[in-house]
């Protein structure tokens, strides 16, 4: 065989290896850039010192039935042991209506209170609802604003 032919074959093999390596790296880079990334968030664990202690607050009676809900005057909020989606709580401040499409109050004059509520209750770097109070070892979550649903109060059964 001719020496020039051998050099040509070696150069073609090197180019083929470079081309295959470049193609594989390009595909991996594209796949990484377009792949769906899942972020695992932990349940919300609040700073206990920031929560309202409601151990002595009476429970709400609704239709003459005791509930686990409590009205917390300092928060102007009814709280419950059952988490509620924070937007559902905050949109109650939109007395003229809530735009699901825009995620805002219909009446712009009500938007400030709604936005402040969202800032306060929206989970950050965690999943689920953010507790705002506790009684013993039980967390309480926002349920509604004002005490309209909790005008009758009494001793909790638990």
Image: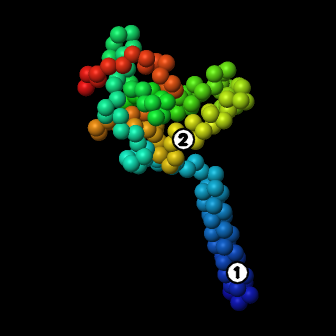
Q: Residue furthest bottom?
A: 3
Res 26 quadrant in image: bottom right
Q: Is residue 76 visible?
A: yes
Which element is circle 2 on? helix
Res 90 quadrant in image: top right
Q: Is 92 placed left or right of 154 in the picture?
A: right
Q: Residue at x 74, y 87 (%)?
A: 4
Vertical relation: 101 (above or below) 50: above
Q: Is 158 placed left or right of 19 in the picture?
A: left
Res 7 quadrant in image: bottom right
What is the crowding at mark 1: few (fewer than 14 residues within 10 Å), some, or many (at least 20)?
few
What is the crowding at mark 2: few (fewer than 14 residues within 10 Å), some, or many (at least 20)?
few
| Residue carrying label 1 | 11
User: Which circle's residue, 1 or 2, is located before the other in the chain?
Assistant: 1
Q: Is residue 67 visible?
A: no
Query: 1 or 102, which lies in front?
Result: 102
Q: Residue at x 62, y 34 (%)?
A: 113
Q: Is 95 placed left or right of 69 in the picture?
A: right
| Residue carrying label 2 | 120
Q: Quadrant of the N terminus?
A: bottom right
Question: Where's residue 121, x and y in %?
Answer: 52, 39
Query: 30 or 103, which lies in front?
Result: 103
Q: Residue at x 45, y 30 (%)?
A: 73
């Amino acid at each position: 065989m001719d020496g020039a032919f051998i050099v040509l074959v070696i150069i073609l093999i090197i180019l083929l290896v470079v081309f295959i390596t470049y193609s594989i790296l390009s595909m991996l880079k594209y796949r990484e850039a377009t792949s769906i990334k899942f972020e695992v968030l932990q349940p919300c664990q609040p700073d206990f010192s920031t929560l309202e202690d409601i151990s002595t607050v009476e429970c709400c009676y609704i239709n003459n039935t005791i509930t686990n809900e409590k009205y917390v005057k300092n928060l102007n909020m009814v709280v419950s042991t059952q988490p509620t989606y924070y937007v559902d709580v905050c949109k109650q401040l939109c007395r003229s209506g809530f735009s699901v499409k825009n995620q805002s109050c219909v009446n712009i004059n009500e938007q400030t209170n709604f936005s402040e509520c969202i800032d306060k209750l929206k989970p950050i770097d965690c999943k689920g609802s953010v507790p705002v109070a506790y009684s013993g070892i039980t967390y309480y979550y926002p349920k509604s604003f004002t005490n309209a649903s909790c005008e009758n109060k009494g001793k909790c059964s638990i």
